[in-house]
Image (tube, rainbow, N blue to C red):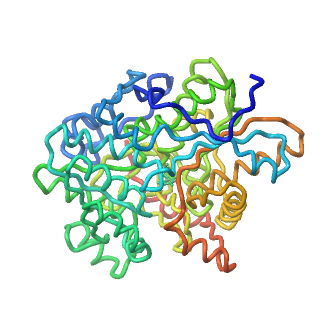
Amino acid sequence: MSEKIPYKIYLSENELPTSWYNVRADMKNKPAPLLNPATHKPCTAEELGHVFCNELVKQELNETDAFISIPDEIREFYKMYRPAPLVRAYCLEKKLGTPAKIYYKFEGNNTSGSHKLNSAIAQAYYAKKQGLRGVTTETGAGQWGTALSMACSYFDLDCQVYMVKVSYEQKPFRREVMRTYGAKVTPSPSETTEVGRKILAEFPGTGGSLGCAISEAVEAATKQDGYRYVLGSVLNQVLLHQTVIGLETMTAMDKYGIKPDVIIGCAGGGSNLGGLISPFMGRKLRGEADYQFIAVEPASCPSLTRGKYVYDFCDTGHVCPLSKMYTLGSEFMPSPNHAGGLRYHGMSSILSQLYDDKLMEARSVEQTSVFAAAQQFARVEGILPAPESSHAIKVAIDEALKAKETGEEKTILFGLTGTGYFDMYAYQAFNDGRMSDYIPTDDEIAKSLAKTPSLS
Ligand SMILES: *Cc1c(COP(=O)(O)O)cnc(C)c1O
C-alpha cells in the first residue's frame, strides 16, 4: 500500500465487531478449570451461578465456540465511544529517531478513562436480562468501579462498589464520579461484611487490598436477593469482552496492509492484553501468521516473571473459586510506594497458559522508568497516559530504540489502555523526584507463595 498511513485510523460504526473472539477455541492446551475451594473439583455452572450471572457463567466455561455474538443492545452502547482509534505514533517515532513504526490502540476515550467499559457494559446487560436488581464489585484505582457505575446507570441497575480504602482516601474524585452515576461506594475493608470485620480485627488500620475488596463484594452479592458479583479483569469472560480491542485493531491494520511484528500490552489481571492479542494469537495458533507478544508488568508486582504457575486463591478471604495461574500468592501486597496500578497478585488463566506454553513473553519494569516513558510520550503524542498503560509505552519505546540500533524497520503495536487524570499524586511524586522503586525480595515472594493451597 503506497498511500500514507493516516495519523489516526478510524473505523466506521458498521465495522464494529459483531462477535467477540474466544481464543480458548484455538488453544491446544486449554487453561485449567476453576476449582471449588472446598472440594477441589472443577466448579459446575450451577455453583458459579450463585455468584455470577448465568449467561456470563456460560461464557466463562465455553472453550469451544470461537465466536460469541455481541447482543445489539451492547453494540448500541459501544457505538457511543467505539470504534476506538488506532493511532500511528509519528511524533514519537520522530522524537526517538527510530526506523520502527509504532502504533497504539487508544482506549481512553470514555469517562471511565480506560478499556474497562467494554466488559462493564456486557456484564451489566446480562445482569439486567436475568432480571437482577443489582451487582456488587471491587475497585482498586477506580477505573473499573467507574466503568461499572456507568454501565449500571445505563441499564438502571443498582451498583455497589467496594473500593480499596487507600484509593478511596487518595482518589476522592474517582469516588464522586461513581456516585454521580448512582453507585454506592464503600471503603474496604468495611464493617458491612463478615469477611471485612474479620480482616479489620486481624489487621486494624489496614489500607485494604484488591483481594480483600473482592471477598467483601462476593459476600455482599451472595447475601442479598437479586444480586450477583461482577469482576473487571482476570476472568475468561472479561478477556472475551475485551477482544473488541484486538478485533478492531486487526480490521484497521488489515485494511491498510499493516502487519505488527511485536504486540505489547500492560498486564494487571490480563484483560486488556488478552483482548488486544487474542485475535492475533488465534492466527498464530492456527499457523496463519507469527507475532511476538510481550506482557509488561510492574517490577513491584511481577506475577508472570517471578510468580509460580499453580492453583491459588483469587481473594484474601478465600471465598472465590481456585484458579490455576501465575501468582505471587493471595497474601502478596505490593509495596505501598507502588503507584501504577496493576497490583493484583495473580494473572488471567488464559494468559498464564499461553505464557507457560511460551507463546507469549513477559517483562517487568520499574515505576520510575515507567513514569519517565509516560512523560516522554505525553510530551510528543499529547495524551496523558494512565500509569498502567505507561508500562506498555515503556517497553514499546525500548523496542523502538533497539530497532534504531539495528536499523530494523519493524512494526510495533501497543495497547494504550487509558488516561491518567486521576493519578496526579503519582505524577507529582515523579515530577518532584520523590518516586522510588521497590522490588520485592525472593524471600518475600517465597513467603507469600508458601501459602498457596496444596492440591492432591
Ligand atoms: C485496569 C486497568 C489496567 C489493567 O487491567 P488488565 O485487566 O490487566 O487490563 C490497565 N490499564 C488501565 C487504564 C486500567 O484501568
Whether residue 294 is visible, yes or no, is no
As drawn, the residue found furthest toward the left would be: 225
Picture coordinates of residue 67, whole percent (x, y): 41, 23
Closest to the observer: 38 or 48? 48
Q: Reply above or below: 146 against 190.
A: above
Q: Reply above or below: 2 against 375.
A: above
Q: Residue at x 68, y 67 (%)?
A: 368
Q: Is residue 33 left or right of residue 82?
A: left
Closest to the observer: 179 or 238? 179
Q: Residue at x 36, y 25 (%)?
A: 68
Picture coordinates of residue 141, whole percent (x, y): 44, 64
Q: Is residue 179 left or right of residue 106?
A: left
Picture coordinates of residue 298, whole percent (x, y): 60, 59
Residue 414 sits in quarter = top right
Quadrant (top left, top right, bottom left, bottom right) of the C terminus: top left
Closest to the observer: 325 or 398? 398
Q: Residue at x 72, y 57 (%)?
A: 380
Picture coordinates of residue 76, whole percent (x, y): 34, 36
